[in-house]
Amino acid sequence: MAAGGDTPSGAASDGALLHLAVADGIATLTLDRPAALNALSRALVAALHEATRAVAARDDVRVVALRGAGDCAFCTGADLKERAGFDEAARAAHAAQLAAAADALAALPVPTIAALHGHTLAGGPNWPSPATSASPPLTRSAA
């Protein structure tokens, strides 16, 4: 399953913003906007929420792995280029959309693991937010 819709700047070449693959009980959700450092646009967050609902409806998934495409970044948080054109109401709606997607991930009945690599900036290392997640926040050592 690939979820996409529109293809804002930074989208993968096939146009999908998020990919869902399930194999051997592992659902892998891949944020696929490597040119935009996997920044969370409205369309990507909507696709993530849709994929999370699809995972929740499956009985063959034992764990979810969330990762970012490309070699440079896991996720850099909200898409600030997109948000620059938002008015206050649109910014609030995007923040609510981000929170709802994080809540949906946290509510999954199976463990969710974020595979952090490369740049993990701004809200990226805190998303899904520890405030909405049953799991402790993931941190990376300075080793």
Image (cartoon, helix red, strand yellow):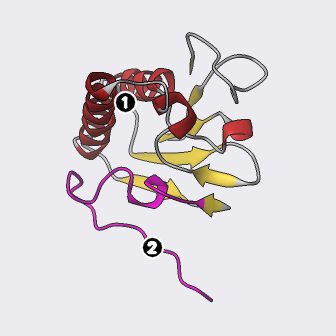
Q: In which quarter of the image is residue 87?
A: top left
Residue 112: numbered disc: none
Residue at the (56%, 40%) spot, across then down:
39
Residue at the (50%, 46%) spot, across then down:
66
Vertical placement of 97 versus 109: above or below? above
Vertical placement of 116 versus 29: above or below? below
Residue 52: numbered disc: 1
Give how far across and how far down residue 14 sits, in percent.
75, 17
Q: Give the range drawn in magenta.
A: 120-143
- Seen from the viewer's position, the closer of residues 63 and 131 is 131
Residue on which disc 2 sits: 139
Evaluate whether residue 40 shows in this view: yes
Can you name the residue that lies furthest to the top here? 5
Viewed as shown, does residue 110 lie left or right of 48? Answer: left
- Seen from the viewer's position, the closer of residues 69 and 43 is 43
Helix, strand or loop for disc 1? helix
- Seen from the viewer's position, the closer of residues 26 and 98 is 98
Residue at the (33%, 30%) spot, across then down:
91
